Amino acid sequence: MDVKDRTYDGGPVETDGNKFTGCTFNAVELRYGGGEHPFFDSCAFNGAVSWRFTEAALRTVQFLQRIANDEGGQAFIADLFEPGKYFEE
């Protein structure tokens, strides 16, 4: 969904599959569940803006945390997050 020039003041904001353009986020909790990546263009983030991962995204974060805490995990995570390695536009 395309969202333009909207101001969010507090509370949760679902981000899956949304394109935010010219929006302002004031002390909100951005939520991502693992669907289509959100896109932010010319947006402002003010105050205590945070992320909460849910559903598939949360399970992925938990899995990566387990790997990071195992022997050799830190090197794997560093390699995984090498800029541009898994990201295609």
Image (cartoon, rainbow, N blue to C red):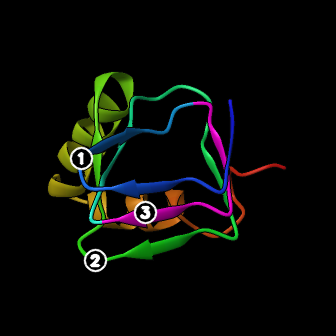
The magenta span reads: 17-26
Mark 3 Cα-neighbour bin, 10 Å: few <14, some 14–19, many ≥20: many
Sequence order check: which comes first, mark 3 or mark 2? 3
> Label 3 amino acid?
Phe
Q: Kindly identify the residue that appears in the image at 60 percent across and 68 percent down.
A: 43
Horizontal relation, residue 31 to residue 78: left or right? left
Horizontal relation, residue 11 to residue 25: left or right? left
The image shows residue 67 at horizontal and vertical percentages of: 25, 47
Asked if residue 25 is among those painted magenta in the image, a careful observer would answer yes
The image shows residue 8 at horizontal and vertical percentages of: 41, 54
The image shows residue 86 at horizontal and vertical percentages of: 68, 50
Asked if residue 50 is among those painted magenta in the image, a careful observer would answer no
Horizontal relation, residue 26 to residue 71: left or right? right
Q: How far apart are marks 3 and 1 (CA)?
A: 10 Å
Residue 25 numbered mark, or none: 3
Residue identifier under label 2: 47
Q: What element carries label 2?
A: loop
Q: In which quarter of the image is the N terminus?
A: top right
Residue identifier under label 1: 11
Instruction: Judge whether 9 appears above or below 45 on screen.
Output: above
Residue closest to the eye, 8 or 52: 8
Mark 2 Cα-neighbour bin, 10 Å: few <14, some 14–19, many ≥20: few
> Label 1 amino acid?
Gly
Residue 63, image quadrant: top left
